Amino acid sequence: MTENLNVFAVRTLTQKEYFAPGHRSCQGCAEALAVRLVAKALGRNVIVAAATGCMEIVSSPLPFTSWRVPWFHVAFENAAAVASGVESALKVLMRKGRIPHKKIVTIAMAGDGGTADIGLQALSGALERGHNMIYICTDNEAYMNTGIQRSSSTPFGASTTTSPVGRVTSGQMTWKKNMPAIAAAHNIPYVATACPSYPIDLVQKVKKAAAVEGPAYVHILSVCPTGWRSAPELSIRLGRMAVETGVFPLYEVEQGRYHLSLDFPKLRPIKEYIKLQGRFRHLSDSMIEEIEKRIHQEYAQLREKSGKASYEE
Amino acid sequence: MGKRVGMEVSIAAAEAVKQANVDVISAYPITPQTHVVEHLSELVANGEMDAEFFCVESEHSALSVCVGSEATGARSFTCTSSQGLALMSEITYIASGLRLPIVMVISNRTLSAPLSIWNDHSDVMSIRDCGWIQLFTENGQEVYDHIFIAYRLAEDREVLLPVIVNMDGFILSHVIEPIELIEQEKIDRFLPPYQPLHRLHPDRPVTMGAFALPSIFAEAKKAQEVVLRSSLSQILQTWKAFGDMTGRYYKPVETYRTEDAETLLITMGSFGETASVAVDRMREEGRPVGLVKLRLWRPFPFDEFKKATLSANQLVVIDRAVSVGGPGGPVASEVKAALYGEEQRPRVYNFVAGISGRDVTPQDYVKMVDKAEIEIEEGNREGYEIYGVRE
């Protein structure tokens, strides 16, 4: 039922594009789709502070721009700090009567490297200070812009150019950093996970994030065919499979309360998801089992936090 | 004339930031910058100043916040020292490339290691080429005055560049000096509210911070180089306007008793006042020694500097930073480069002195002049040494 609604309800979204077509992202880039949906969700009264990364490079080759809303790129690690400055300036200039009062949403946008690695300190500072802004992390699980290097958000087992498969190790040997939990630990009013394969869910969450007073954090899984070594036409399906296997559950944390957006009585076998991606091609059945065990554990913990009764596997 | 009040120079700097009606202040504490932002936080906490003041989690974010707020059209301020400046150095280059008129006070302090909280110019010299207008001050009054001068200059539509006001840490920042405060009405006329050329606002969307391919980068950089160089005329105009308001006229290169001088001391920052005492003593002894003080470091005032120095036989350049493995201190390098094209040029002897806040007394300047004159006499034409090292 939900699935059907999601398929047809996209037509209820605005036809207006604020992230214009013609940008230079790869075929099947779900990150560009995520950004497009975020922009649609918020409309024109926004200011975007973007970190260095794929979305910056594909959208802003001087003298061109794909942005129909005010957009600002400064550096890699400071999107949250720059957005803090934007938000503070809007506040003080409206208070002093130098610009008219109106609701303008400040957005910081960064990839997983710009969020979970180099930008974590600036993000933590901004969340702690309580700026009224939305931080969007578009997570494609590695440094794709520089050529698929591992980040702390790369999943266990994935092969990247700096976590290669060698005679001794088999790709990334650490587990994905839990960024939404880190954001939620700041006791901010709103944290959510989303995926452009569920566009209506994504748009609703971004709108909710804009409506709360104070900082909101939205973590968006963004399938990257180039880095995941997957077929571009499978990006939407892979996003759905990430959710259905429990690899990337969709949930919200509102004022500290967890709520699963989609709950699966039985998770799809993780093997189906893994087998569609070249970055995991070297994984043995036993390694896949190990990953699945951990994913199921984490999913069960999340269900518990969301007040769901545990179920037999 | 304004009221003369005895106050710590850091407090005077903060009072100037208040009078300049700054909108956003972000800062991270580092010695010896702290008194400036402590006082600003008090002013905001007491409602004496209407600004967004917040403490960020690093200097990198302190300047990043200012970049964000300035791009949104708010007059922005930060202040740092030493390691803090090193941490924010990445963003200093971006702020100027984006033509954002931020003003920053640097309470100059030594860069580690060894760790030292005391004064020298190694911090700001590490970002020499960051594209900001860079001024050095000699006393508290100059610090206070240059906050207003810096904002008016930075926000000039012909300039639109960030400005650094250097004040020597502790030597200036922590001393109490008589400061002549300027009436608020005068400041308001001198420095009207900031009207940005472009700002981040949905009513007129702009993209800022686009990346450049090699096919356009050189043109963008050249434009920045042209504007920094040509800002000199606006700098002179701004000083003129400030002088007309207060009676205190500033110049890019100040001279002291340089008439008929054969030897000139060259200093930058708080060295100047002590050096002038040394010059007085040497003049009393009948020695033809004068003093040239650089106030403007970027853009480097080549013509003014040459005019002030070309008639001398020798220049004794006192640096407050080491360019390790290089040709000498950074000021001496610049001085030599400025004079190189001249047929007849004075010889240059370079001392690095006062690093990590070691005292440089009037007697030390006399000793340095003595040593330089002997060395040059003996044919050591391009000498360089770190002064006063126990070996």
Image (cartoon, rainbow, N blue to C red):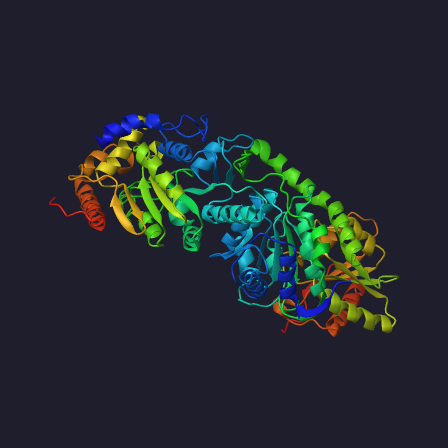
Image position of A179 (left or right of B302) = left
Image position of B250 (left or right of A258) = right
Q: Which residue is painted at 61% across and 53% down in the image?
A: B22
> Does A259 sit above or below residue B276?
above
> Does B316 sit above or below residue A313?
below
Locate residue B123: give its quadrant: bottom right
Image position of B57 (left or right of A243) = right
Most foreground residue, B338 or B98: B98
> Does A204 sit above or below residue A182?
above
Regarding residue B94, the answer to whether it shows in the image is yes
Q: Position of residue B136 (x, y in %)?
A: 69, 58
Quarter containing the C terminus of chain B: bottom right
Most foreground residue, A199 or B303: A199
Quarter containing the N terminus of chain B: bottom right
Q: Kindly give the residue lying farthest to the left in the view shown.
A: A312
Image position of B300 (left or right of A65) = right
Locate residue B135: give its quadrant: bottom right
Locate residue B318: give its quadrant: bottom right
Most foreground residue, A206 or B220: A206
Q: Which residue is painted at 72% across and 43% down in the image?
A: B230
Q: Position of residue A219 (x, y in %)?
A: 35, 43
> Does A273 sit above or below residue A75?
above
